[in-house]
Image (cartoon, rainbow, N blue to C red):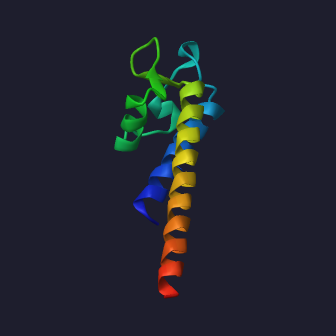
Amino acid sequence: MSDAAYIMIKQNEYMRKFRQAEATNPLQAKPLAVLGIKPSRIFRRMEDKAIFLPGRTPDTYYMDTNAAEDFIEARRRRAFFLLLLVLAVAVVLFFLGRR
C-alpha cells in the first residue's frame, strides 16, 4: 500500500471515529484515548487544518464537520485534476507515438 493511500485511510478512520462518537461540537469533545486515536503526525496535520479542534476541557477534541467536508471535497478535486492530467499526458503520448 502506498503512503498516500495509508494517509487517506487513516484520515477517513479518524473522521469516522469522531462522527460515531458524536464529537462534532465543543460541548461533546472527547479525549483521543476514548476515541481510540493516537496523536500521530496525520492527526496533527488535520488539527493544523482546523478539522480537529480542542474542546472546552483540556486534552479533548471535536471535529468541525464543515472543515471536514471542505477537506474531503478538496481531496476529491485534487484527485479529479490529477486524473485529467494523467489522461492528457496519455493522449499526448498516444499521438506522439503514432508519428
Q: Is residue 97 above or below residue 33?
A: below
Front-most of 46 and 57? 46
Question: Which residue is situated farthest in the bottom direction here?
Answer: 99
Q: Quadrant of residue 25?
A: top right
Q: Quadrant of residue 53?
A: top left
Question: Which residue is situated farthest in the left direction here?
Answer: 41
- Residue 12 image position (x, y, % from top left): 56, 45
Image mark count: 0
Q: Is 81 placed left or right of 54 in the picture?
A: right
Question: Which residue is situated farthest in the front direction here?
Answer: 99
- Residue 97 image position (x, y, % from top left): 48, 85
- Residue 36 image position (x, y, % from top left): 50, 39
Residue 86 visible in the picture: yes
- Residue name at image x 49 percent, y 88 percent: 99
Front-most of 51 and 18? 51
- Residue name at image x 49 percent, y 29 percent: 51
- Residue name at image x 58 percent, y 39 percent: 73
Residue 23 visible in the picture: no
Q: Is residue 13 above or below residue 99?
A: above
Q: Is 95 placed left or right of 40 in the picture?
A: right
Q: Is residue 94 above or below residue 47?
A: below
